[in-house]
Amino acid sequence: MLSDPQSSTGDSITIRAAQVSDIDRCGRICYEAFDAISGHHGFRSDFDTPESARLAIASMFGHPSFHCIVAEESGAVVGSNCMDERSSIWGIGPITIDPSVQNAGIGARLMTAMMSRAAERCVSGVRLLQAAYHCRSMALYSKLGFRIREPLVLMQGTLVSEIPTGYAVRAAKTEDLEGCNRLCRQVHGHDRAGELVDAITQGTARVAQYEGRICAYSSGIGFFGHSAAENNRDLQVLLSGAGAFSGPGIIVPARNTELLRWCLNGGLRIVQPMTLMTIGFYNEPAGAYLPSILF
């Protein structure tokens, strides 16, 4: 592992902390990397425009609770990686490398730097999602100690469903934090409090209530948000009240056959297979959930 993940050199590669001035370059690399890899395998990219990739990178580079690093080769930025440190479990991604220097070990250097930081800070667990069709990334993460936990599918479309009687779906408020965090701990054994605070502030968080009690919540119905619910019916209610999904779609655990079938019957389609991988603390979920692209 790297002794100092902030600034470490080897051969012509330097790993250093990301700066605001790196956003444009790293946003462009992010777009080109995802476009090249997904296109090679016959899938649509997670980022449909260079600007959408730039905005995603900017949101992380500019956030005080994200640790972001870049890789330089002979002084030129050739890749980046980010780690969400807002809660007790940290999520890694996106890791992107300039397509012109792919397969040169840069991705391994960026990942090793992040794992070193997590180990030094004794974090409970680290997680990531990867495109299941991308065998090289699955091999890299497996070598670094990650375990495959859950097959996932990215789903898109317009969901045709109604909210049953007795339920209500509304925007989450600050006073809902305790109930939402308790629900997340019930499902996963940990909460995502820092992430949820941001989502409430940004106006993306939603809750579903049954007879006035919170039974499901989401930090955002879509690619960048996670959801947790007591059971599939409660999660389905939350999805029914979403309207449109943000980003490329929602990520659904493929082993949850009941939820997957409901989504398909409701008009959604599967567009990409994905994999949840973890290091450290992990519980089999005790309820229904949707991961974000981080975990």
Image: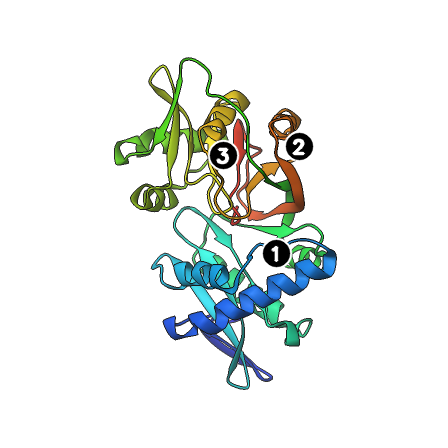
- Residue highlighted by disc 1: 45
Q: Amino acid at mark 1?
A: Ser
Which disc number belongs to residue 279?
A: none
Residue 250, picture quadrant: top right
**Front residue of this view, candidates 71 and 173:** 173
Give the CA separation, mark 3 to mark 1. Answer: 29 Å
Residue 240 picture location, percent across and down = 49, 27
Q: Which quadrant is the N terminus positioned in?
A: bottom right
The answer to whether residue 11 is above or below residue 246 is below
Residue 23, picture quadrant: bottom left
The residue sitting at 52% across, 21% down in the picture is 233
Label 2 secondary element: loop
The answer to whether residue 142 is above or below residue 69 is above
Which disc number belongs to residue 255?
A: 2
The answer to whether residue 3 is above or below residue 238 is below
The answer to whether residue 146 is above or below residue 254 is below
Q: Amino acid at mark 2?
A: Arg
- Residue highlighted by disc 3: 188
Q: Are marks 3 and 1 in contact (CB under 8 Å)?
A: no
